[in-house]
Structures are given as C-alpha cells and as structure tokens.
Image: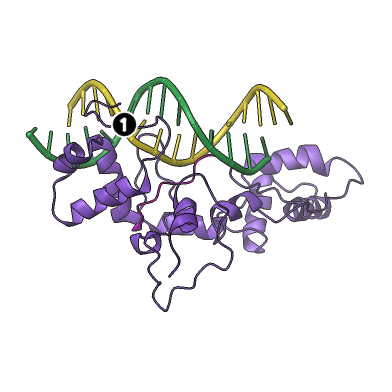
Chain colours: A purple, B green, C yellow
Amino acid sequence: MNQLGGLFVNGRPLPNAVRQRIVELAQLGIRPCNISRQLRVSHGCVSKILARFNETGSILPGAIGGSKPRVTTPKVVAYIRDLKLKDPGIFAWEIRDRLLSDGVCDKFNVPSVSSISRILRNKVNQAGQQPQPQAGPQHGAYHQLYPYGYAAAAAAAAAAATVVGADQDKWTPRGAHTVSDILAVPPPHHHQPNPHPPPLHDYGCCHVYQHWPAQ
DNA sequence: GTCGTAACGGTTGAC
DNA sequence: GGGTCAACCGTTACG
C-alpha cells in the first residue's frame, strides 16, 4: 500500500483501467495532483503515465523483460568475414562503415566497433567455420514484443521526441497502441491492423485484446 | 501546494 | 533449468 492508501504491486504496472482513468480525468481537465489523490496513485506515477500518453498516445506500459535482438546475425558475420578476407588490414570501424554503406545493416542494427572486433577475433579467425544456420526468425524476441519489427520500433521511439528519464524510461517503442485500441474501437482506414498480433501477455495490451469483446 | 524527475527496490523475459 | 542482464514498473523524496 502506498502513502495515499492505494494498493500496488511493486514492479508491476497499474491495471489498464486505472491507467485509462488517469488519462480520462486529465482530459477532463482534472489536475494531476487531484487525479493522484482521487485514484490513490502516486503523483509521480500519474506524471509518468500522462507524459507517456502525450508522447506516444498510448496508455499502455512498456515491454518488461527480454533482451535486445542480436545484431551479429550469421549474415552479418559472414559479410564481416568476407570483408576481412578480401582486405586483412581493414579496421573494425571501416567494416562498420561498409556494413552501413552496403546496406547490410542499418543504423539501428549495425554492430558496434567492439562487437565487430570480437567477431574478428572469435569467428573470423576460426578457419573453415561456416556461419550457423539461422535457427529461428530474425530478431524473433523483439518481433514478438514489437510486431512492426525492432528497427521500426526504434525509429518510432526515436521519432517520439525521446525524453530521458531517471531509470531509462526513454525506450517506449510499444507506444503503438492508443486508447481506441484498448477500447477495441475500429481503427481509421489508413491504419492497417497487425495480421500477427503479439502473443498474449499477463498484463498490458495483450490481456486487453484477450478479454475485450470483439465488435 | 504542485509538478518533474532521480533514485530505489522490485518484476519480467530473452539469452 | 537456473543465472545473468537489461528492459520495465510504481513509489518515494527532493528541488
């Protein structure tokens, strides 16, 4: 229980109903401090949720857990090996530039210079070893979390006038859902529904998708 | 009194 | 299957 007498689960997001109520009250002109008292949610939390809503249009929490996708895919490793074989004196930073200029990677998934150095050290020097066949979908983890792909999500996040918060709240690429989404309101015509909805989750949008009556 | 945010302890999920 | 890591969360406290 917090100082206002509200119940919360440490580490877990507030229920969507409460998050939505916060946004609704704010839109009615209720001041954040009053929302905080009324819903017994800390003002810091109200501030965060409203700030995120203003930024992304989403009341939903971000994706908890998971890891960033690997950037050193077999394709990239093979390309680096190729460059190194053709030019043994090439520098890691030159390889990085080539990966970008040759379109093998984009700015969101290009490996760091240190990663390239590690690849050169660990993989390229292993004579005769072929890249591992791709076991699963590329960036599968984040394709589950971010149905439009990691790079697109990162681009969206970058476009969303990133705010740097205390605990790295700057990464909110899941802000693709709106209150309308939550309410299962049919999207506008230009909005293409995701043909592959994310897997059900124990909180957040997925739960809403699961339980909200279809229209 | 209000608001923004840093710091904190906690949970989660991919690797 | 369990540990690690890096995301996230909401609360608290401070300016």
- The answer to whether residue A168 is above or below residue A206 is above
Q: In the depicted view, which residue is nearer to us: A160 or A20? A: A20
Residue A13: tell me if it is visible: yes
State the SS at label 1: loop
A163 displayed left or right of A95: left
Q: Is most of the magenta stretch helix, strand or loop?
A: loop
Q: Indicate the chain on which mark 1 is placed.
A: A
The residue depicted at 37 percent of the width and 44 percent of the height is A15
Asked if residue A59 lies in the magenta stretch, the reply is yes
- The answer to whether residue C6 is above or below residue A98 is above
Q: Please state, as top left, top right, bottom left or bottom right, where the C terminus of chain A lies in the image.
A: bottom left
Q: Please state, as top left, top right, bottom left or bottom right, where the N terminus of chain A lies in the image.
A: top left
Q: In the depicted view, which residue is nearer to us: A102 or A146? A: A146
The residue depicted at 73 percent of the width and 48 percent of the height is A90
The residue depicted at 36 percent of the width and 42 percent of the height is A164
Q: Position of residue A96 (x, y in %)?
A: 64, 51
Q: Position of residue A199 (x, y in %)?
A: 58, 53
Q: Position of residue A7 (x, y in %)?
A: 31, 31
Please tell me in which quadrant of the rendered image residue A126 appears.
top right
- The answer to whether residue C11 is above or below residue C6 is above
Image: magenta residue range = A57-67
A180 displayed left or right of A27: right
Asked if residue A94 lies in the magenta stretch, the reply is no
Residue A66: tell me if it is visible: no
Q: Which residue is mark 1?
A: A7
